[in-house]
Amino acid sequence: MDSPSEPGPRAPGKGDESRSSAAVDWTLAVRVAARLARAEPSMSSYTREQVRSELVELAASAEEPVREVTRLKDGAQVPEALILDRPGWSRAAASSLAGLLGGSIEQRPRGLLAGRASGLQAGAVLGILSNAIIGQYDPFAGQGGQLLLVAPNIIHTERATRVRPRDFRTWVCLHEVTHRVQFSASPWLGGHMRALIDTATPASGEPLLAAGQRLVTAIRSRDGSRDADPLLGTGILGIVLESQPPEQRDAMIGLIMLGTLLEGHAEHVMDAAGPRVVPTVEHIRAVFDERRHERRGLLQWIMRTLLGMDAKMAQYAQGKRFVDTLVERVGMDSFNTIWTSPETLPRPSEIREPEKWITRVLE
């Protein structure tokens, strides 16, 4: 339950039609995403069930080491992880997105042509992501959030990187369970994120032509002289941020800062808890650090930029440096002050210079 003093989800109202999920044909989006999903890695039905059972087990067992490192407690019952295939993840993601937009995945779009166009776009993005997402904690799913693990992608990745399967699966679970703990131990956090999302996607809406004109103006105004900020976005993301009205831009930056903290904290926990429960953690970390920096072709670069994947990698790196520095300087208990309220979350300048957060929040 959200704290009474914190902003919670905004209930859909009469002004929400322009941002409602009814503007998207989610049924079509799910079908398109399923068609774009790659075939599963070859395995027997016995192996598939064995993987599913092991992932459920490892997600549950990761709870204790995560809580030992984070020192975050809530006493809540640990829900079972949901193990999905690629189309299953797309459907779960579509359902969550529809809910965030004030509707449901079963709703029929009001405008047939606009709904189908939006459905095709959403389905294309979901389909591409479904081939890459390994695990995810969705704080808005169900009654109290849901941990999702995409089994085919986990198997594909461990085979491609030749890491030890059980160790890799444990490593993945440490990261995603950390996200679950972050939200379960900070009941206000989900409401705050929802409020930022509501502001970043306002109910008032804006004509598509006007939004496009703002984006074109922002692109033309770039002279190439400004330093790229990998955290606030290079390329498309940075241009989109610059083109937004102040309130929306601030909300989007707030979401980026929150994501940077959440991902950096999870990376810190993986490294702190890993040696105790993942015998080959150093090898796995080295393999994935190398993969994050490997050169890619032009098409891959375009897709990663449009989907914000490179900005996501910057969040991992910068966020981990921020958390590592703070924990080293003030200890985990003092660091956990960060989970007190929206006012104690890091600001952009503090992510880059953690000492500023210490001065503002702890001193």
Image (cartoon, rainbow, N blue to C red):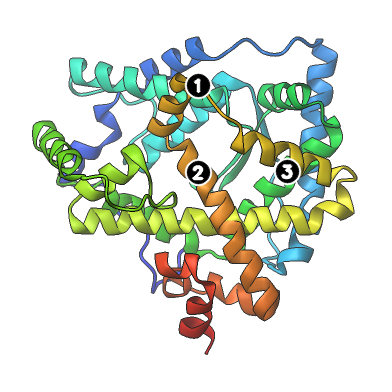
Secondary structure category for the residue under label 2: helix
The correct choice, above or below, for 31 with respect to 73 in the image is above
Numbered mark located on residue 297 in the image: 1
Residues under labels 3 and 2: Cα distance? Answer: 19 Å
Q: Is 329 positioned to the left or the right of 215 in the image?
A: right
Residue neighbourhood size for the residue with mark 2, other residues' Cα within 10 Å, grouped as few (<14), some (14–19), many (≥20): some
Q: Nearer the viewer, residue 106 or 196?
A: 196
Q: Which of the two discs, 3 and 2, sits closer to the camera?
A: 2
Numbered mark located on residue 312 in the image: 2
Residue neighbourhood size for the residue with mark 3, other residues' Cα within 10 Å, grouped as few (<14), some (14–19), many (≥20): many
Residue type beneath disc 2 = Lys
Q: Earlier in the sequence, mark 1 or mark 2?
A: 1
The residue indicated by pointer 3 is 173
Residue 142 screen position, x and y as percent: 53, 43
Residue type beneath disc 1 = Gly
Q: Nearer the viewer, residue 335 or 60?
A: 335
Q: Earlier in the sequence, mark 1 or mark 3?
A: 3
Q: Is 351 positioned to the left or the right of 135 in the image?
A: left
Q: Is 175 positioned to the left or the right of 94 in the image?
A: right
The residue sitting at 75% across, 55% down in the picture is 271
The residue sitting at 46% across, 70% down in the picture is 350
Q: Nearer the viewer, residue 249 or 99?
A: 249
Q: Which of the two discs, 1 and 3, sits closer to the camera?
A: 1
The residue sitting at 39% across, 39% down in the picture is 99
The residue sitting at 34% across, 42% down in the picture is 237
Q: Quadrant for residue 216, please give it.
A: top left
Q: Are marks 1 and 2 in contact (CB under 8 Å)?
A: no
Residue 55 screen position, x and y as percent: 77, 34
